[in-house]
Amino acid sequence: MRFCVIGAGSGGRAFAAYIASKGYSISLYNRSFTRISDIIKKGGIEASGELTGFLPLDCITQDIELALKDSNVIMVVTPASAHKHIAKMIAPYLTEGHIIILNPGRTFGSIEFIKIIEKYRGNIPIFVGETQTLLFTSRQLSENKVNIIKIKDSVGFSCFPDKYNDLVYEIIKDIFPQLEPIDDYFEITLNNIGMLLHPTISLFNAGLMDFGKKFKFYKEGTTPRVCLVLEMIEMELNEIFEKLGLKQLKYHKWAEKSYGVKAETIYEAIQKVEPYQNINAPTQLITRYFTEDVPTGLVPISSLGKFLGVPTPTIDSVIHLASILCGIDFMKEGRIIEKLQIQNLLKERLYVEDIAIGTLFLEQKDESSKKLKEYNNFFQYN
Amino acid sequence: MRFCVIGAGSGGRAFAAYIASKGYSISLYNRSFTRISDIIKKGGIEASGELTGFLPLDCITQDIELALKDSNVIMVVTPASAHKHIAKMIAPYLTEGHIIILNPGRTFGSIEFIKIIEKYRGNIPIFVGETQTLLFTSRQLSENKVNIIKIKDSVGFSCFPDKYNDLVYEIIKDIFPQLEPIDDYFEITLNNIGMLLHPTISLFNAGLMDFGKKFKFYKEGTTPRVCLVLEMIEMELNEIFEKLGLKQLKYHKWAEKSYGVKAETIYEAIQKVEPYQNINAPTQLITRYFTEDVPTGLVPISSLGKFLGVPTPTIDSVIHLASILCGIDFMKEGRIIEKLQIQNLLKERLYVEDIAIGTLFLEQKDESSKKLKEYNNFFQYN
């Protein structure tokens, strides 16, 4: 079995080194030469941390055709905002049975990826899935190095459609025992933590980020009142999860799972996550915190809310102001459900939910969403 | 003629000293004792700057009935968010012919004031007007002092309804020759500069203001990209002005008039206004920048936009996020036109505009608003 890793940042390097360490044949692709020039020179990656030593790679290249040649599994390890471009780029070279995993997918990553491949190649039998978060906590070092701080114990993944989960899992489970197949694709793809924190905190510190002032992004820029807005966004998300019969992974629970902190609120959790405390704010305004997390996170959620009849005024406000700040029409650029063409899929889901769960339970769900309704009434002015 | 000044901050003290210097009888009211205790002790105000010397006052008190006794003209010199409370408080003591001037009114100040007086006293023949900005540039000093840096040459004022302008002007013109009656009340009350800058700049620096970090509000916190949002708000405002056949005072023009700076954009103007450069950001988040300027500025504009069919998505986003940050439902607390009951007045205005100006000109106005429409289409996602 041959792997191809797309993206040679810290995540891509970690994947390439890990796969090579398992003795598999592997090619590494990167768009720009600077990221791979030293890896080409040395013929492989120098890993430190949980994985140590020099790992040779079979092929390191800027030529996507060459990178994909004879590959069976493609690991996409780039910002989610690059997925569209990558799908179009690799479409001509895909063959029957190819497995593609987005690390991570953000919201509706696999669906967007499949739609673009269909557009350029028609309906070919390939399998596309995504992880909820990156398998590695890693930092890119200079030259051909990578520091793998942590290989996570368990990361959820799912294909779209999720009926292919078992098939794909059988193929990759020996190499990636940490990947845990989740039955419901929506549960993986909607529980996107990046979109909750990054854009909103950036918005409330936009002035000084744009000015280039030095400050601590989480420790100084993320205060109790800023977290009120994050809590509000989480409530809007919760309403959507309830409508779809899905379990929301709340931030403080995610922080407990990922960092072992015990907290009741978002503010408390953020203050307790040790690795956050020394993170400086970006010294420029336009970063992945907006350009990745708005179009591949808040935008699909907002369009989903509109489809389901769930108001998302706070999410919409963040999208609108971020669009002006960045000069990018994120609602146009981003993953809206009309473009993903999942209206029928959503209707089916709602219908199945209705039959399976029954009216009584739906009423209880309405009950549980009262809190958001009260909050919304409080802020109602449309 | 006897004056009553309500509010003993820097503005109120400047008014009291100025009126006393003209030889008129005057009382000064303040809600809290700390602001007036030293003035009571000394029996008057110690002025410096454009007005110099000790100015004795007839009455300095926390008792509103006493303050208003035998008064003819009432100068309200408080944050606009206090107008509602003051109107209710003084209503029982008003007598026929009383003149009340709000310094300044912010948006629809006089209308709100009259409605509340009507509620508590019915229809009594009094005259309520407002200025566009404060007549004095002043700073409150310790004890009984005030520093009057500048008495402005010309400040627009208008009564509501504006048919009373001449009548009121005749009475006050000898004491306040700087006040310039403006024919159209709407032109005074809608050209509210404070609401343009304060809430939005505060929003984009909310994190560090809430954290209490020291930085320069305008010099560091108001960057080119923050000013893109201010330009967008100015465009939404412009559409409303055009619909009502009114001339908008653009910020860079206002800065030229007020500070003599020549600039083409909001960012350029703000960077050139010398007194702005050393202003520190408030070291707390909840200030008049939100609690005054949102409910008495952005909120009435948003509700006016809805009435006129002009979309104000940027203004609405700022209001919504500021509401969550402050824990105040500003759309409920603020001056919305339904509460002010000016729907018929607005319909009449639009009707008169239509007849007087003709359909052709209205079409030209539509033409001139194309720019905003294009911008809005760019950001359209509703």
Image (cartoon, coloured by chain):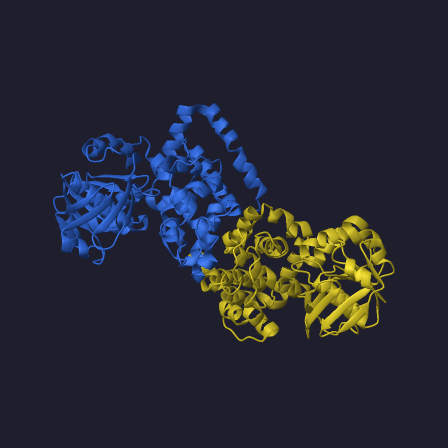
Chain colours: A blue, B yellow
Horizontal and vertical percent for residue A211? 44, 62
Which quarter of the picture shows residue A270?
top left
Q: Answer with left or right where residue A159 lies relative to residue A274.
A: left
Q: Answer with left or right where residue A230 lies relative to residue B179.
A: left
Image point (40%, 43%), residue name = A274
Horizontal and vertical percent for residue A163? 26, 31
Horizontal and vertical percent for residue A186? 35, 36
Horizontal and vertical percent for residue B126? 81, 59
Q: Is residue B65 visible?
A: yes
**Quadrant where the N terminus of chain A lies?**
top left
Front position in the image: A104 or A219: A219
Q: Is residue B311 visible?
A: no
Image point (51%, 73%), residue name = B263
Count of residue discs: 0
Which quarter of the picture shows residue B99?
bottom right
- Residue farthest toward the right in the current orientation of the protein: B70
Front position in the image: A44 or A375: A44
Image point (32%, 50%), residue name = A81
Above/below status of A72 relative to B246: above
Image point (22%, 34%), residue name = A168
